[in-house]
Image (cartoon, rainbow, N blue to C red):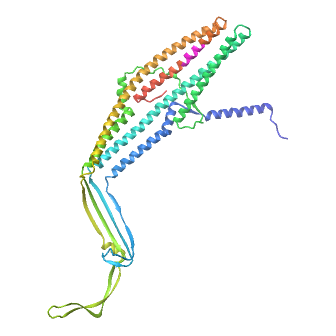
């Protein structure tokens, strides 16, 4: 007979399983702090990786420009089969036979002078590498600011969701009270409808706040290159403890510091230097080039034969007649045998070398050199203007940021006072409404004012924190909460 579990035991087991699953789900949620969000973004974000790839390409360009100052070395072997009447490459005579020929050479050359182009190109590529490193830093800094902004948006929306839920709770209590009063005839149908409308408005505010929260969390996940389905918990710092926020700044002091560290300005200035160096590279086309070269080669011919032996065969050939005596001059005939000339012997015998120096003087190149120099000058002037624009934009942004943080402080203090005043007013009206001394319209108006002032205070609080952190960003300070 199988043992059976009693009902209490089953209940305990089911409860334990459910509790374990809840604990597992909670543990599966990744806790995200502001610093962790920044670290994950810097480690995973694909925009940063693209900037790093561009930087790596610039590094390779710099290495290659240095390698261009080294001599090159080229080998050019060639093998051919010749058929029919052709020229024996070893004797330069016409023959009518099949020949296998092999020739080749090794050559090298080094540029001694090219108008300084090689050296100037190295310098320019160094500057371009610095520019791409600065561009990578700019991408990182921009992403950090975006992450901080989004993180604060998440915190703001979390508080707005919480405040919206509190509004719903108050609206429900109000509706219950209105329903009871209507049932006993103490309130009209209009009062009841007002309470229902207030609850509907609270539900709508909650839905909107929840949507904004989900959207801001999704944006934060995208910066961290995180799967949208990943469950995360945003660790909320105690914003109320941020009492040491500095809001008074001298914009000139902030600007002076930011000019030396701002990546936008640094990038524009480095790019300006690279275009100025490009002018020197382009001017190198006006100068002659001096090239030192050397070459070594040899060749082999299958038709090349060497004498192996020669013997007299007893016959003579007349090779001439003595003038005056008419006496014939004869020479003995030989029977000769030949053998093919060995491969390595021919290579050794035919080995040749050459060395020299080449001077190439540009006389007329259809004005390409002049056009290159003029274009480089225009680009340098444009880069100079771009750098000044970056400085001007930074100055404008710094002054605006300083004014914004001061305005945010004043706005936050104002919203605190407004919220406290509306809260006190609502408490009084609520007490009077309970005893029937205030109608539902006045009550709902007071509640609406209280809710709006609470939302305004929450947003102003985070806005003040954000504006303060923007100043820290431009000062190069680490952004923490």
> Residue farthest to the front?
366
Is 186 in front, or is 94? 94
**Residue shown at 35% from the left, 28% from the top:** 392
Residue 55, x across and y down, in percent: 41, 43
Quadrant the N terminus occupies: top right
Residue 163, x across and y down, in percent: 59, 20
Looking at the rendering, the stretch of residues picked out in magenta corresponds to 447-455
In terms of image quadrants, where is residue 452? top right
**Residue shown at 54% from the left, 14% from the top:** 419
Residue 57, x across and y down, in percent: 41, 46
Q: Is residue 246 visible?
A: no
In terms of image quadrants, where is residue 435? top right
Residue 74 forms part of the magenta stretch: no
Numbered marks: total: 0
In terms of image quadrants, where is residue 233? top right
**Residue shown at 35% from the left, 82% from the top:** 339
In the displayed structure, does residue 145 sit left or right of residue 312?
A: right
Establish if 228 lies above or below 306: above
């Amino acid at each position: 007979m199988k043992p059976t579990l009693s009902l209490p035991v089953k209940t305990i087991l089911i409860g334990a399983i459910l509790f374990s699953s809840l604990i597992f789900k909670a543990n599966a949620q990744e806790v995200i702090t502001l610093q962790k969000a920044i670290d994950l973004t810097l480690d995973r974000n694909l925009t940063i990786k693209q900037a790093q790839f561009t930087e790596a390409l610039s590094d390779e360009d710099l290495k290659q420009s240095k390698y261009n100052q080294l001599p090159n070395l080229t080998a050019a072997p060639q093998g051919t089969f010749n058929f029919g009447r052709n020229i024996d490459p070893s004797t330069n005579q016409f023959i009518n036979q099949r020949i296998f020929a092999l020739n080749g050479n090794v050559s090298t050359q080094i540029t001694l002078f090219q108008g300084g182009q090689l050296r100037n190109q190295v310098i320019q590529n160094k500057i371009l590498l610095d520019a791409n490193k600065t561009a990578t830093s700019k991408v990182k800094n921009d992403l950090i600011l975006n992450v901080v902004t989004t993180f604060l948006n998440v915190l703001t929306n979390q508080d707005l969701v919480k405040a919206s839920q509190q509004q719903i709770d108050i609206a429900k209590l109000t509706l219950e009270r209105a329903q009871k009063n209507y049932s006993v005839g103490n309130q009209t149908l209009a009062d009841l409808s007002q309470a229902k409308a207030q609850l509907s408005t609270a539900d709508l505010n909650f839905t909107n706040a929840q949507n904004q929260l989900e959207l801001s969390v999704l944006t934060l996940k995208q910066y961290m290159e995180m799967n949208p389905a990943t469950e995360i918990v945003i660790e909320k710092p105690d914003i109320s403890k941020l009492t040491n926020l500095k809001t008074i700044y001298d914009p000139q002091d902030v600007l002076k510091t930011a000019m030396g560290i701002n990546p936008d300005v640094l990038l524009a200035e480095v790019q300006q230097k690279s275009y100025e160096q490009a002018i020197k590279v382009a001017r190198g086309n006006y100068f002659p080039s001096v090239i030192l070269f050397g070459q070594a080669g040899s060749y082999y011919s299958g038709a090349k034969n060497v004498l192996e032996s020669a013997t007299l065969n007893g016959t003579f050939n007349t090779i001439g007649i003595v003038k005056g005596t008419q006496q014939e001059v004869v020479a003995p005939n030989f029977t000769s045998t030949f053998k093919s000339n060995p491969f390595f012997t021919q290579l050794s015998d035919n080995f040749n070398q050459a060395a020299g120096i080449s001077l190439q003087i540009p006389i007329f190149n259809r004005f390409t050199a002049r056009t290159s120099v003029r274009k480089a000058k225009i680009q340098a002037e444009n880069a100079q203007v771009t750098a000044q624009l970056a400085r001007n934009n930074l100055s404008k942004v710094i002054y605006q940021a300083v004014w914004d943080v001061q305005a945010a402080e004043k706005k936050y203090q104002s919203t605190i006072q407004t919220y406290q005043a509306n809260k006190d007013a609502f408490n009084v009206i609520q007490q009077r409404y309970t005893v029937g001394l205030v109608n539902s319209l006045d009550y709902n108006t007071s509640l609406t004012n209280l809710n709006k002032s609470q939302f305004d205070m929450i947003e102003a609080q985070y806005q003040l924190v954000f504006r303060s952190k923007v100043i820290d960003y431009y000062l190069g300070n680490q952004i923490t909460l």
